């Protein structure tokens, strides 16, 4: 079965059985303790904890996921960084019995034979999962038949994602020798100290890799031979299959990350993107691929997924431009860096760090070329470097502005109103991606996939001016970071802030973590005029505005 049909069959199967189809959420989750969306359940986390689901108790989705945990395995038959996860979920609706029966029924419906299943065998804290044993036995699975196995905490217990959240025992389904479907029974809440407390409401959270299912359904020996990869691999020439698979996987991941507005950099998400792009380029070198070899691979990826994720097509040029720019940048330093890695008599962690800093070679990439003697000193140097740049960032952040003249302070407050107005008009998923303020104007970058219409711009401008006219008081409170994160939405990692942070509130209209300073009342701002709207990278728009 083609992957597109599997997606549709899965969603339809569960829709017919009382599940609401919910679209994939972004690869960049709102939970600030995780960098990427790694599982279908993430967007539903709060509903497992008792929050009311606007979609009802039972839902089904096909979720884009990105994981770096398996990056070293990529190149074998089944591991990937980017993949799609099919999942059905229940928040206090049905339980284990129905979840297992539905899974079996779905696999039967698409002619997938289950080799065996695993069940949580119990430990000193969580008992053996007897209900799952009973259901699977009734379906013909048992230890005697050699198709039912018990495993411990390491294999058959899942979650939480991030620092805390729902988790529980799992039952996993294996076909053609690989794990295809993980059924998680969210019965516990795991807190920051890894303590488990039983949840009042039972929960079902399942995850099945689309690529693996396609591999089995299409009777292939690896995910790379399915229709989700084979057209991409045709674009990569050479004899080394592992290298080709790594390139295909990494470029696919990069395309989807860039689509979400991630740009290559040396920190956090940007670093992960840089790492997969540069790793792909390095493997391209091993295959003697020509310069700019990434573009046709990225184009093919967009072609394969364009029908399912049409925004890939509308942003194709921007995505390709980001990839090409990074390829050219890396190309320049690659040769010099390689030479140095090979030349130094001893490759210590400290030297590796210098190479990382000078040439942008991630540690993992350096280690693929040569062993680093003491990795600890690499991490030590990296931490020291981060502390220095963080201190710098905080300083910059406190000032936040080119200078602290009355006018720049006004622009700073105006930028808070602007963000809040954009969230009200364009949607709550709008985040600030950057800003630059002088005494003459403000420049503001935010995530949005299309050009703003004249009407949208006018609405945003009007709403800001309405809030200025309301002459609202701008209030500042200091509070612990954890508390602040509960009330303010931020798009970057809280590590940038200290433990006590400032929160600026403009009535109920805007709440932001910010170092200040700001005006006392919005009435001081005068009148805002948006002077320009333009693109500032894939999925990022830029507004310029002045105060008159
Ligand atoms: N949430 C289930 C899984 O990721 O396998």
Image (cartoon, helix red, strand yellow):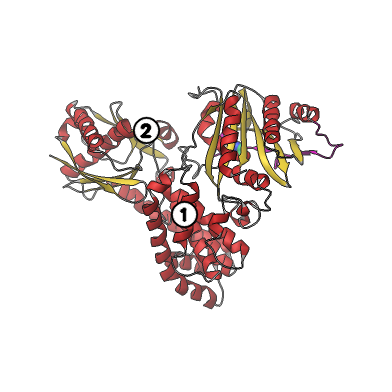
Q: Is 295 rendered above or below residue 66?
A: below
Q: Quadrant of the C terminus?
A: top left
The chief SS type of the magenta part is: loop
Q: Is residue 275 magenta?
A: no
- Gap in angstroms between the C-alphas marked 2 and 1: 25 Å
Q: Which residue is mark 2?
A: 428
Front in this rendered view, residue 526 or 377: 526
Q: Find out whether residue 155 is within the magenta segment.
A: yes
Residue placed farthest to the right in the image?
144
Q: Nearer the viewer, residue 256 or 466?
A: 256
Measured from the top left, where is residue 381 in percent x and y?
Answer: 48, 61
Q: Who is closer to the viewer here, 147 or 204?
A: 147
Query: Residue 231: where, in percent of width, then height?
Result: 54, 55
Q: Is residue 522 above or below residue 72?
A: above
- Drawn side of residue 538 relative to residue 530, left or right: right
Residue 131 horizontal side relative to residue 323, left or right: right
Q: Callout 2: helix, strand or loop?
A: loop
Q: Give x and y (percent) for residue 490.
A: 39, 39
* 301 left or right of 18 in image: left
Residue 408 horizontal side relative to residue 383, left or right: left
- Give the quarter the ligand 1 occupies: top right
Location of residue 446 (image quadrant): top left
For label 2, the crowd category at 10 Å Cα-Cα, with few meaning under 14, some 14 to 19 and many 20 or more, is few
> For the magenta stretch, what is the residue range?
140-165
Seen at 42% across and 40% down, the residue is 499
Q: Is mark 1 within 8 Å of ligand 1?
A: no
Q: Which residue in the protein does label 1 denote? A: 273
How many residues crowd mark 1 within 10 Å: few (<14), some (14–19), many (20+)?
many
Name the residue rendered at 23%, 32% in the picture.
459
Residues under numbered marks 2 and 1 in contact, where contact means CB atoms less than 8 Å apart: no
User: Residue reaching furthest left?
Assistant: 548
């Amino acid at each position: 079965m083609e992957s597109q049909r599997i997606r549709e069959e899965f969603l339809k199967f569960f829709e017919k059985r009382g599940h609401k189809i919910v679209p994939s959420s972004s690869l960049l989750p709102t939970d600030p303790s995780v960098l990427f969306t790694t599982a279908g359940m993430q967007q539903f986390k709060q509903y497992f904890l008792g929050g009311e689901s606007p979609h009802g108790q039972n839902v089904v989705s096909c979720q884009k996921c990105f994981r770096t945990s398996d990056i070293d395995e990529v190149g074998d038959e089944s591991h990937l960084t980017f993949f799609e996860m099919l999942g059905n979920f229940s928040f206090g609706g049905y339980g284990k019995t129905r979840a297992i029966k539905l899974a079996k029924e779905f696999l039967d419906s698409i002619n997938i034979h289950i080799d065996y299943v695993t069940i949580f065998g119990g430990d000193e804290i969580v008992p053996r999962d007897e209900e799952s044993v009973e259901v699977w036995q009734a379906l013909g699975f048992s230890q005697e038949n050699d198709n039912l196995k018990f495993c411990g905490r390491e294999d058959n217990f899942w979650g939480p994602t991030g620092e805390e959240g729902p988790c529980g025992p799992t039952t996993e389904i294996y076909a053609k020798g690989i794990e295809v479907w993980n059924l998680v029974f969210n019965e516990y809440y795991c807190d920051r100290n890894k303590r488990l407390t039983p949840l009042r409401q039972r929960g079902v959270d399942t995850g099945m890799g689309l690529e693996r299912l396609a591999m089995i359904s299409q009777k292939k020996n690896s995910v790379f031979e399915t229709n989700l990869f084979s057209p991409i691999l045709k674009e990569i020439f050479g004899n080394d299959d592992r290298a080709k698979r790594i390139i295909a996987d990494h470029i696919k991941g990069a395309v989807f990350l860039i689509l979400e507005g991630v740009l290559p950099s040396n920190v956090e998400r940007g670093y992960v993107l840089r790492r997969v792009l540069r790793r792909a380029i390095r493997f391209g070198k091993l295959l003697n691929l020509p310069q700019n070899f990434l573009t046709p691979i990225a184009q093919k990826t967009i072609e394969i997924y364009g029908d399912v994720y049409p925004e890939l097509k509308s942003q194709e040029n921007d995505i390709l431009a980001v990839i090409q720019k990074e390829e050219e940048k890396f190309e320049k330093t690659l040769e010099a860096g390689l030479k140095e890695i090979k030349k130094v008599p001893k490759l210590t962690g400290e030297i590796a760090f210098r190479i990382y800093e000078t040439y942008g070679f991630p540690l993992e990439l350096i280690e693929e070329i040569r062993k680093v003697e003491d990795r600890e000193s690499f991490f030590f140097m990296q931490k020291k470097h981060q502390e220095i740049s963080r201190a710098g960032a905080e300083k910059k952040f406190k000032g936040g502005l080119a200078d602290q003249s009355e006018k720049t302070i006004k622009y700073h407050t105006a930028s808070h109103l602007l963000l809040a107005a954009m969230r009200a008009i364009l949607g709550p998923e709008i985040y600030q991606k950057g800003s630059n303020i002088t005494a003459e104007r403000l420049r503001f970058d935010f995530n949005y996939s299309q050009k703003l219409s004249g009407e949208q711009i006018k609405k945003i401008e009007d709403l800001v001016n309405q809030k200025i006219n309301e002459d609202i008081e701008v209030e500042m409170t200091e509070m612990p970071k954890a508390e602040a994160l509960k009330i303010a939405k931020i798009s970057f990692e809280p590590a940038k802030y200290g433990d006590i942070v400032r929160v600026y509130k403009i009535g109920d209209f805007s709440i932001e973590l910010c170092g200040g300073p700001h005006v006392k009342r919005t009435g001081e701002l005068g009148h805002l005029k948006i002077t320009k709207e333009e693109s500032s990278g894939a999925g990022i728009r830029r507004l310029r505005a002045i105060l008159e």
